[in-house]
Amino acid sequence: MKVKMNVQTAYHGDLLRAGKVYDVDDETAKRWIASKLAEKAEDQSVKR
């Protein structure tokens, strides 16, 4: 699932920056969205 990060975090050894869109697994994306760490992204370029 594509997410737009609201915060900067490390994920599997990579640094994910706030404001950028990344592709992460669905389970992780749902947790991040629920805890407001990220929001679901529309079709945009993906960094990961």
Image (spheres, rainbow, N blue to C red):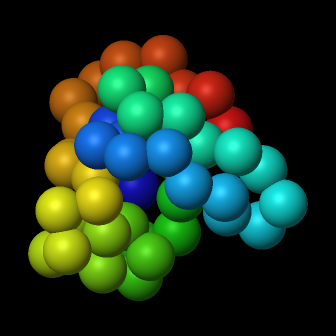
Q: Position of residue 5 (x, y in %)?
A: 36, 42
Which residue sits furthest right?
A: 13
Toward the viewer: 18 or 25? 18
Q: What residue do we see at 29% from left, 43% from top?
A: 6
Residue 43 lies in quadrant: top left
Judge whether 40 appears above or below 12 on screen: above
The quarter of the picture where the C terminus appears is: top right
Q: Position of residue 22 (x, y in %)?
A: 51, 40
Residue 44 lies in quadrant: top left
Toward the viewer: 39 or 44? 39
Residue 15 relative to residue 3: left or right = right
The quarter of the picture where the N terminus appears is: bottom left
Q: What residue do we see at 21% from left, 30% from top?
A: 42
Q: What residue do we see at 52% from left, 69% from top?
A: 25
Q: Position of residue 26 (x, y in %)?
A: 41, 72
Q: How many marks?
A: 0
